[in-house]
Every structure is written in C-alpha cells, then in structure tokens.
Image (cartoon, coloured by chain):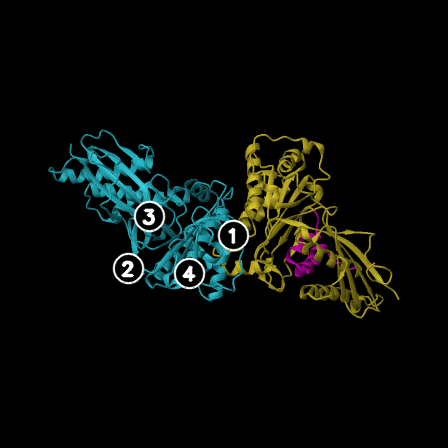
Chain colours: A yellow, B cyan
C-alpha cells in the first residue's frame, strides 16, 4: 500500500482592521476588506498532517488527539475545492496517481490550549488547506489557495501569509476575487511584538458568525462603517505598514477595534464582547501612551474579551514593564527579560486587582506563514501516531 | 423691607432618544433633537425657592442646605436672560417694582440622594429658571422659558413639561429655535412606569460635556448617527407616543440607548458608561421580552451605568416580578405590591449574583411638569429656613 503524506504548520493571525459582516454566508464573502498581523508559530500554531492512499475509502479527521470525523459543511467545501484542483492536474497528466479519488486522513494539533479562548479556526483551516495543497502538489499561488481557506473560515485566508496581510473583499458574486495578499513580509518590519492578555469570562460569547449576521441585519451604524470608515482606513493602514509608522498604525488599530465593538453594541439585541477587565486594559494602554506623549502600544479585541497589545521591540521595557507591574501574578511570564521585570513605572495609577480578571499572558511577536515541517502526526499506514 | 418670593418644584426627565453632542457649547445647542419621559415628582424632584428684595445687593445660592454662591457661568447666563425679560416688563410698565435690578437668593433641595448617581442638573436648572420666571411674573410660554433652562443644562429644557417631551434641536445660530415642546401630556398615556436600578460603579465616569465633545470630534460613526439615524427615529418615536404603541416605543428606546453608547465606544479614546452589571440588566430585559414574544419592557442608560426600565402598568407584575426575583435584596422595594412579590417567573435563567452590582431600586412613573407649591425654603427675610 502506498501512502502519500504531507505536513505543514500554520499560524494564528490577529486582525488590526476587523472582519465583521458577511455578504455571502456560504462562500464567506465579507462586507469589508481587513488587515492582520501573523503571529509567531513558536508560540501559537496548528500542525496538520494529511495522508491519502488508494485503500482509504473515506475521509477522516483527528483533532488534538480525538477522532472527529468530517462533519462540518465548511470542511467538506474545502476538500471539494482542493480535489477539483487536483483533478485538473490528473486530467492534464495521466501519469499522476489519482489522489483526488482517494480518502483523506487529516490529523491536526494546536500547540496552545483551546482553553486560552483564542480563535484557532483560522490556523486550523489554513493548515488543513495548505497541507492538502502540498499533498496534491497543487501549482497555485498562496493567494489562490487562500480562497479555499476562506470558505473554511473567513479569517483563515489571512493565515496563508506571514508578516502583514490584507484580505481584499473583492466584489464578484462567486468570490473569485476575495482573497488574501501580502501587504509586507515579516522582514519589512520585524520588530512588531504582541502581548495577549487572556481575559477570564463567565459568559458564553455570541458566536462570531451569528453575531455578524445580527449586526448586518440590525445595526444602523454598520453600513456607515463598511461603506465609509473601513475603505478609507484600509488604505491608510496599508500605508502605515509600508512606512513602518507605529504611531499611526497603532491609532488606526485601536480605532478600528473600537469601531467594530461599537457596531456590535449597536446591534439589536446588542452584542457585548468587551467586559470590565477588557475596558481596564484599554484604559491602561491609553494612560501609557498619554504618559509617553505618543502611541507606543495599541490594543485590539476580537469577538471576545481577550486583549492583544501590539508594540515595537524597542519599547518592550516600557510596555511589558507596565503590564508586568500590574499582571505579574498571571502565568505566562517565563521568558520575560530582567529589564522588563526591573522596569519601574511610577506615574501610572491602575486598579491593582485587575489581574484577577486575566487567566494568562502570551508573549509573542510577528511571524511567518505556513511552514513545511519534518514533524508528522501520521504513521506509515496514514493513521494518527 | 419687602421680600418677593416664589417656589416651584421641577421633575427629572430620562431621555428615550438621547441628547449627545453639542453644536454650540456656550448656548448648549445640540447636534440632534431628543425625546424624554418626565418622571413623577413624588419620587424625584427639585424644590427651589427664590427671593428678591431691594436690600439684596448680590445673588446667592444654597444647595441641599449648603451655601454654594453663584459660581457657574451657566447659572450666570440663566440669571442674565431672566433679568432681561423682567427688564422688558418693567420698561413697558413703570409701576412694576424693579426686581431685575435686585439681588436674588436661590435655595434648592432634591428629594433624592445625590449619591444615587442620578443626573440632578436637569431638574435643578428647570426649577431655578421656572421659580425665577414666576417671581418675575414673566408672561412667556414654557417653550420660551425652556430656552433659558437649556443654557443651564441642555436636558433641563425638557424638564419644563410633564409627560412626553421633545427638545427640537433647531437650526438657528443664536439658538432661538432650540427649545422643548410637549409631544403628549401625561394624560395621553398615563400608564408609563419606570424602574431605576442604581448601579454601583467604582470608577468615575467621563463628565457628559467632556464626553460629548470627544465624541463629536473623534467618532467616525457619530455623523451618521446624527444625520441619518436620529432624525428618522425622532419622527418615529413621536408617532409611537401618539399611538401609545409600547412595542415600537420600547424598541426605539432600546436601540437609541445602544446607538448612543456605541458612538461613545467609537470615540477616541473610547468612553464606556455601561459596566458588566448594566450589560446583565440589558440581557435580562431582552430575555423577558423574548419569553413574552413581544416588548413589554425597555431599558435606557444615560451617561452612567444606571438602568432605567420603562414598562406599562398592565405589565407591572411580569416586569417588576422578574426584577424583584433577582434584585429583591437591594433597598427600594417598600411600596411594591404583593402581586409583584408573589409573581413567579420560572423560565428565565439569570445571574443570581447580579444584585450585588446594584445599590438600590427606585420605582416611579411618568409625571407632570414644574408645579407651584406652598412649600417654601426661604423665610420672611428671604434667607434659607
């Protein structure tokens, strides 16, 4: 029995210009373009191995050690698209094995606990699509492949690139122009770092797909956001990245996070993702920037209370020093430097109990796109190790 | 020594279509029209007595038993306008005493604790302006007088009427057309009741004048709110009042509260008035309306975390019964009926600790405008009793 295998890792990305709203739910076509920073895979990544063989009669999926099967229609849509591209190759070269007709085994693991509350679907679908594209030896460029990942989970398309990434919304009905593109590679501005404060929350958030649909249908302010605010901000933010202008980049990032949460609140019934701890962190960042007289740290919040704080490496002592001062009791500080620990910030007053609302901190930085890896999660029979 | 005196009470009003944004800070001219319900003065009112005499050489103000003096430029502006109207009377009838030239003593008291965190400036300025207008025997209609109260505190102009009140923004630069008008009197729809949950808050809110200026200057969504959303909602809400359509009135009230807090959040830095307890109350109201299959309760929040819940008297057992179930341990339930206490709502699940974030409840209803009163706070010498 010949078993063909491939493995890849794929990163998490955190949007600085938010994706919120679908114009087509099945194809995951957005109502606005978005921008993200890809995070380092040493801290946050999905590893996915895929295997196929003429003996595999059906598809199967194992996630974090558990057999899940292929249930979701989004996963099925991705597999269908990937098989179609493989079929085109096979039709043009009859010497190729007919992988497109065989069952697929997909084995996937995250290097971070799901309990961290970080959206893992972006990294997950990116890894799944890229691993199969490699297995199938598809010649398409990453932007083309990103359209398939997009059907799995909208923001997954942005995880197909490292560095600074845009998802261009496109305007075709079939979604063929709604894809991820690189704004700038990691190397262009490698000093971008990120501290993620994982905020504890007792309530279950509105799932983002449900939330988006509600905002599109009910918010009176939403149309203004997507038609007027975001298109302008999209061009401005790309420019700040190309110019490595952290002050402006940070300001736009914070404003867009607030704008996104504002249209959530303007939905009916209102949707709340920020809690009192999130708000305290927002205020702390504004106090820091105010003290410095310029923006050296920028928060952003996805569809949940976790704070992602972007900053440049040169300001690490100031930014992390302040966060350490008030959140040193939460886990995650193992790799922090002595300079950060010893940093003294005297002027800023802050709620000394705020750390109680935070369960851990993840210290990370900008990172690269999906990587080939010699690690594999499948054995020679194409089953999970 | 002849001392002339007059006394009045004036009510609190709570907006159902929010005033947020000034187009002229000195004249308190708003960027949008607003609508409010005037609340019953047996629960919440300011009582103000004024006295004047040829022997009073200067103006003075006593507030809740404490001599404050006339310090605020807004108070000074109100006194100046009132004296000008009195002067016109005196000029046209030389037999009138020259009250406009004499000092004014103003003595004012609220029947509710300032600690309740309820904006008392509206009732306060309304009572001050109406008391002096009575003292001066001004012939102007309440809408005219409301323009003077508006200069004291924007929303004070709406406290010059009972029942359902609109503040028409006007468009003249001098503000002469920016005034309160009656949408419908108390008697038109007298069954409107209100429960105010006073929410504890450890942080100091952004003062509303500062907050408004920040929103006008920085929120990208704000212009859409004032130019597109509110003008339409203003007409719709007046219609729902005239038709006594609580379902639609309640929906518009909740949506406008959310829209107002959304543009606060979209300000830069963002402004937060709702806290986690406010959000829990919002969810509870939506759950109740969902269970009933129609809107029988509507929340609204001003520039702070306190919830005002409007409902119709016929639904008191359902609405107050549910609130009582989860907030019975907070003070303020003295006058509640047995039917409310015994009301059992089995289906709705809610955070049983939420009451810990609430310091008291105030049960009240729609009320009338400023009232003449035989009560007085000044003695025969025109000094505080």
Q: Secondary structure at mark 2?
A: helix
User: What separation in Å lies between label 1 and label 3 (alpha carbons)?
Assistant: 44 Å
Q: Residue furthest right?
A: A1
Marks 1 and 2 belong to one chain: yes
Mark carried by residue B354: 1
User: What separation in Å lies between label 1 and label 2 (alpha carbons)?
Assistant: 36 Å
Disc 4 crowd, CA 10 A, few/some/many (<14, 14-19, 20+): some
Which of the chains bears the disc numbered 3? B
Q: Is residue A150 located in the magenta-colored stretch of the structure? A: yes
Prevailing secondary structure of the magenta residues: helix
Q: Residue furthest bottom?
A: A57
Marks 4 and 3 belong to one chain: yes
**Which residue appears at 50% of the width and 61% of the height?**
B287
Q: Earlier in the sequence, mark 2 or mark 4?
A: 2
Which of the chains bears the disc numbered 1? B
Disc 1 crowd, CA 10 A, few/some/many (<14, 14-19, 20+): some
Q: Is residue B329 located in the magenta-colored stretch of the structure? A: no
Residue A141 position within the rendered picture, expressed as x and y whole percent measured from the top left? 73, 56
Disc 3 crowd, CA 10 A, few/some/many (<14, 14-19, 20+): some
Q: Earlier in the sequence, mark 3 or mark 2?
A: 3
Q: Secondary structure at mark 3?
A: loop
Q: Are marks 4 and 3 in contact (CB under 8 Å)?
A: no
Mark carried by residue B171: 3
Marks 4 and 1 belong to one chain: yes
User: What separation in Å lies between label 4 and label 1 (alpha carbons)?
Assistant: 19 Å
Q: Which residues are magenta?
A: A137-162
């Amino acid at each position: 029995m010949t078993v063909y295998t491939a493995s890849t890792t794929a990163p998490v990305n955190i949007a600085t210009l938010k994706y919120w709203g679908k114009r087509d739910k099945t194809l995951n076509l957005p109502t606005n373009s978005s921008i993200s920073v890809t995070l380092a895979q040493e801290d946050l990544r999905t590893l996915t191995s895929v295997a196929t063989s003429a003996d595999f009669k059906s598809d199967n999926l194992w996630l974090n050690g558990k057999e899940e099967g292929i249930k979701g229609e989004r996963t099925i849509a991705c597999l269908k698209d990937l098989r179609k591209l493989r079929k085109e190759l096979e039709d043009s070269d009859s010497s190729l094995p007919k992988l497109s007709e065989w069952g697929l085994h997909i084995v996937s693991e995250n290097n971070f606990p799901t309990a961290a509350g970080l959206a893992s679907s972006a990294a997950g679908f990116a890894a799944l699509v890229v691993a199969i594209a490699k297995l199938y030896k598809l010649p398409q460029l990453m932007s083309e492949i990103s359209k398939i990942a997009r059907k799995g989970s909208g923001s997954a398309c942005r995880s197909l690139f490292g560095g600074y990434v845009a998802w261009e919304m496109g305007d075709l009905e079939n979604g063929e122009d709604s894809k991820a593109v690189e704004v700038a590679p990691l190397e262009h501005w490698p000093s971008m770092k990120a501290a993620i404060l994982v905020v504890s929350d007792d309530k279950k958030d509105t799932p983002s797909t449900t939330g988006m649909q509600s905002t599109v249908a009910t918010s009176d302010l939403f149309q203004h956001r997507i038609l007027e605010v975001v298109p302008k901000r999209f061009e401005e933010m790309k420019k700040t990245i190309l110019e490595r202008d952290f002050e402006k980049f940070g300001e736009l990032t914070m404003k867009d996070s607030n704008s996104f949460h504002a249209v959530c609140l303007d939905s009916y019934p209102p949707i709340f993702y920020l809690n009192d701890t999130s708000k305290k962190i927002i205020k702390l960042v504004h106090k820091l920037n105010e003290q410095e007289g310029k923006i050296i740290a920028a928060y952003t919040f996805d569809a949940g209370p976790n704070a992602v704080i972007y900053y440049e490496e040169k300001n690490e002592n100031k930014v992390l020093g302040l966060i350490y001062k008030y959140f040193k009791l939460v886990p995650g500080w193992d790799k922090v430097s002595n300079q950060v620990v010893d940093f003294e910030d005297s002027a800023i007053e802050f709620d000394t109990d705020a750390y109680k609302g935070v369960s851990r901190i993840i210290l990370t930085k900008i990172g690269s796109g999906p990587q080939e890896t010699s690690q594999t999660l499948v054995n020679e029979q194409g089953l999970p190790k």
